[in-house]
Amino acid sequence: MSATIEHLESLISHGRYIEARINAEEALKTSQDLRYKQLYALAVSKSGMPETALAFLEPVYSQFPDDPESAGILGSIYKELFKKNQSNSFAIKSRDTYFRNFSLTKSYYTGINAAAMTAMAGQASRSRELATEVIALIESNAANDFWKLATLGEAYILTKNRAKSTEYFVEARKLAGNDWGKVTSVYNQLWLLNNFIPVSGEVMKMFNPPMVMAFIGHMIDHPNRSTPRFPAAIEPQIKNAILNSLRASNARIGYCSLACGGDILFAESMEELGGEVNIFLPFSEVDFIEQSVAFAGEEWINRYTRLIKKFPVTYITNESYAGLDDLFSFQNKVICGSAVLRSASHHADPTLLTVLSAVDLKRKQGGTRDTIAVWPYPKNYININPDNFVTNQSAPPSETQSQSKPERPDRPVLFLVQVNFESVPAMALTRLLKDVDSKIFDESITFRSYKASESSLLAGFDMESSAMEFIELVTDSLKGSSAQVSAKISLSAGPVFMEAKNSPINKTVTGESVALVKRMDSLAVPGTILASDHFAAVLALESKKYTIEYCGVLTSENGNRNVYTVKGNTL
């Protein structure tokens, strides 16, 4: 087996589907190896695009109908479409694909899936027969094989032998350890099966994926800080409190920034427990180290450097800091929303952990306080209050010195909406532009920039709620047309440079977020709303209003970005 195939399989087994897809695409440029095609289709399907995966793999399967991997992956794609659309036709196609291959190869993998999909298609008796056949195939040689043990656990569920099912699932869980890809894979199968056949709560709990946790916290006190809040002396107590919170919550997937103090302690704690860390930086690394790490000393720079090399990093912007503090607030929302999106894939709710002074929170407005206020799961919120560990001797008071900040450019964080109406008929377009103008020019919807051309318009808003109100206006206008017409709508969020003119009408905006929304527009189709990862993360904090689904990775000049589809109750 080639190193590339091993790497792809490892990425998929650890749930890193986007990276697997990118790597498989690269591999297919130089080789048409069947395994590359299989892994590409699997990664595409698991990253939320089963329709695309189906179109790619069906021709491959027709060439290799006897190959168990091709059949297994195709069957799983049909199964994903069944889960997504609740159409029994996909359940039957999945069952038939798995069963056809099982009949030819006696592969236990396609056999257990044929049995499960037969049960979901409403044929319990036939499902038990297939499950019994799978048990006979592998029960004598399943020791120390995770997938065989998990298969036996599922087969015994289908034959209604709860004791034997639990026995095998216990053994499988021991072997899985901290391999969250395996744990989540079994859990998602059990979650689906439980909608048709009762699965024991004990087994469900056993494979419940680890908690996803977002983190926001204070930095170590700056040397010029007059009143201690997080002095270096209390670092051990804070670290211990973070570790205890992670253990108590079973949190092993973390989202955080990497400033000195709370962020780095959280990342180190998650690492110590064998967890996964997803790092976000608000602006260029050079500026971030200068603003948020270096003042605490060389030791913190070294700790930062080690972590940044080990775990994946997402930049809110690659541009400079330039004294724009709203980047920190936006970053915190993206961190929290990203944790919400990740947790949704586990059918669970995330937890927010903070290290914040209660005194400081009562006194301050905006920023961190506002982020906590919009956290959608107040019952899943833990704060470690550093005030409890600070004593008068923790740090000597000193005079606070004002720090000079660079001259600030006009570069606010905006929520951008690109509407492409190339496919909208002339009469419907006239109505749309009239409706939009009536709201824009009388300022019924608060906006920062608006510029229209013959084929599209781009509007910028300070708040995501204003952006979504604008989209509702657009979609309502098109619904009112006599013909069924749709526009392409693309969303991105981040800092933009603004043209120096007083009126927001016809104001030009530029920057990474503008380039991204235009790139998304070039790939969108009418009737869809595409959102960049950062815009989707902020919307995820209002999860009851919107349905957000992953739809792929977008390659731009600033790197690969995740893209989501957005649907709302009123859109």
Image (cartoon, rainbow, N blue to C red):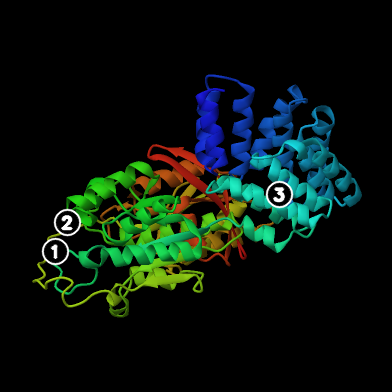
Query: Could you tell me which residue is drawn at 45 percent across and 50 percent down?
Result: 274
Q: Which residue is mark 3?
A: 168
Query: Could you tell me which residue is drawn at 74 percent across and 42 percent down?
Result: 78
Identify the residue at the far right of this view: 125
Q: Position of residue 292 (x, y in %)?
A: 24, 56
| Quadrant including the C terminus | bottom right
Q: Which residue is mark 2?
A: 295
Cα separation between marks 3 and 1: 57 Å
Q: Do labels 2 and 1 touch, CB within 8 Å?
A: yes
Marked residue nearer the N-terminal end (3 or 2) = 3
Marked residue nearer the N-terminal end (3 or 1) = 3
Left or right, 1 with reference to 190: left
Q: Position of residue 329 (x, y in %)?
A: 34, 63
| Depth order, front residue of 566/385 | 385
Q: Residues within 10 Å of mark 3 (few under 14, many from 20)?
A: many
Marked residue nearer the N-terminal end (2 or 1) = 1
Mark 3: amino acid = Tyr
Q: Is residue 358 above or below residue 331?
A: below
In the rendered structure, find residue 47 and report the number of the disc placed on it.
Answer: none
